Image (cartoon, helix red, strand yellow):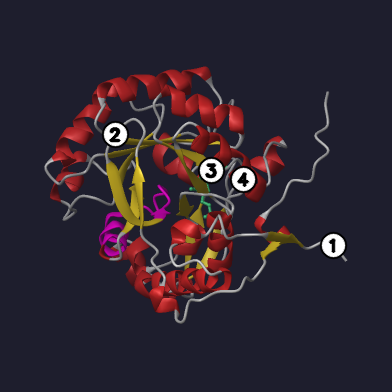
Amino acid sequence: MRIENDRKLDFDDVLIRPKRSRLETRAEVDLKRTFRLPHAGFEITGIPIIAANMDTVGTLPMAGVLAQHDMYTAIHKHYDLDELKKADLSGDYHFMTFGLVEDLSHIKKVMDAVKDKGINKICLDVANGYTEIFVNFIKKVRAQHPDCVIMAGNVATADMTEALIIAGADIVKIGIGPGSVCETRSVTGVGIPQLSAIIECADAAHGLGGLICADGGCRTSGDVAKAFGAGADFVMLGGMLAGHTECLTEEQLKALPENNNHIEYYGMSSTEAMEKYSGGVAAHRASEGRVASIPFRGDVKNTILAILGGLRSSCTYVGAYKLKEMSKRTTFVIKYAK
Ligand code: 5GP
């Protein structure tokens, strides 16, 4: 047994120190970023916020609206091929999600089906990205799709961030346990406070020319700013984008009044999700997600504008003309407990 004694931080433990700035209005702030992908070999440009690949968040309607704002969506993996083929999606801002249960031929089938829409981004998502099986899976998917962007995770430490990049990931998804409907920390005792995980993993990834996506734990636009300040290249949001029109089916929208204008936001490893997609929780597993009943919040557009407005304001407070400069200009102050 060993104890790591240095303090690890969550978003709530810090604030961003304001700095002298020449910026006159928030409108001057450029939130778009261009990244070169180390394996795929080309550049992508957009506002680096990604809707989570959860079936209540990473929906096709969500992808449509976010793309209008140059933001990304990891489309969840439970759509069938016909739905994907029919979907009115074009190009640059969409990741298709797969887990370890999807084999290479399925991944090829889906990526071939969306190719003519210009979709060339893959999200390989598992709860525990630390297994050798997952590393080998990334290698195989990279060999099959040399020209696609691959985002893979989740991990929360430098060693494994490096391992996934070396295996073929362009972007490593960071976060073990910070999610708003995640129960990994209480069920397993495992996790790393998210702000420290981002700082550690960004450093490791950037050293190899790779990128990271901070996944989970953002509850406010201030948290999103802290994630970028800590070095995240992308930030993935679940709960902050949940509960909107774009998250619901027509039947769910109709049923809103009888549900007191509330909807369910549940973890993808929750009992609810496993019953829906895997016929229940397997005997050897425990649920690591929970259900939250959240108020319906209308169209996601308003939430998006509030998040982007908050982020622009954070940039003006530290004097960053571009989101790209945010981490260089960030000093965190630690709020010690009273
Ligand atoms: P949020 O933005 O809601 O705080 O976090 C979203 C992230 O939580 C997702 O992108 C995913 O990584 C994680 N997540 C989603 N469902 C579950 C779950 O059932 N269990 C755990 N441990 N994490 C989950």
Q: Tell me the element at label 4.
A: helix
Mark before the other along the chain sequence, 4 or 1: 4
Q: CA distance from mark 2 to mark 4?
A: 25 Å
In this rendering, the label closer to the viewer, 1 or 3: 1
Q: Residues within 10 Å of mark 2 (few under 14, many from 20)?
A: few
Q: Amino acid at mark 4?
A: Ile
Q: Which residue is identified by label 2?
A: 41
Task: Mark yes or no: residue 298 visible.
Answer: no
The yes-or-no answer for disc 2 within 8 Å of ligand 1 is no
Q: Which residue is identified by label 1?
A: 337
Position of residue 325 measured from the top left corner of the image (x, y, whole percent): 49, 58
Q: Which mark is residue 271?
A: 3
In this rendering, the label closer to the viewer, 2 or 3: 2
Q: Residue at the location (27% across, 60% down)?
A: 67
Q: Amino acid at mark 3?
A: Thr
Quadrant showing the C terminus: bottom right
Q: Residue at the location (66% across, 46% down)?
A: 196
Quadrant showing the N terminus: top right
Question: In the picture shown, does residue 100 fall above or below 198?
Answer: above
* Region rendered in magenta: 49-67
In this rendering, the label closer to the viewer, 3 or 4: 4
Position of residue 297 measured from the top left corner of the image (x, y, whole percent): 44, 74
In this rendering, the label closer to the viewer, 1 or 2: 2
Q: Which residue is identified by label 4?
A: 199
Whether label 2 touches label 4, CB < 8 Å = no
Q: Tell me the element at label 2.
A: loop
Mark before the other along the chain sequence, 1 or 2: 2
Q: Tell me the element at label 1.
A: loop
Left or right: where 222 falls relative to 164: right
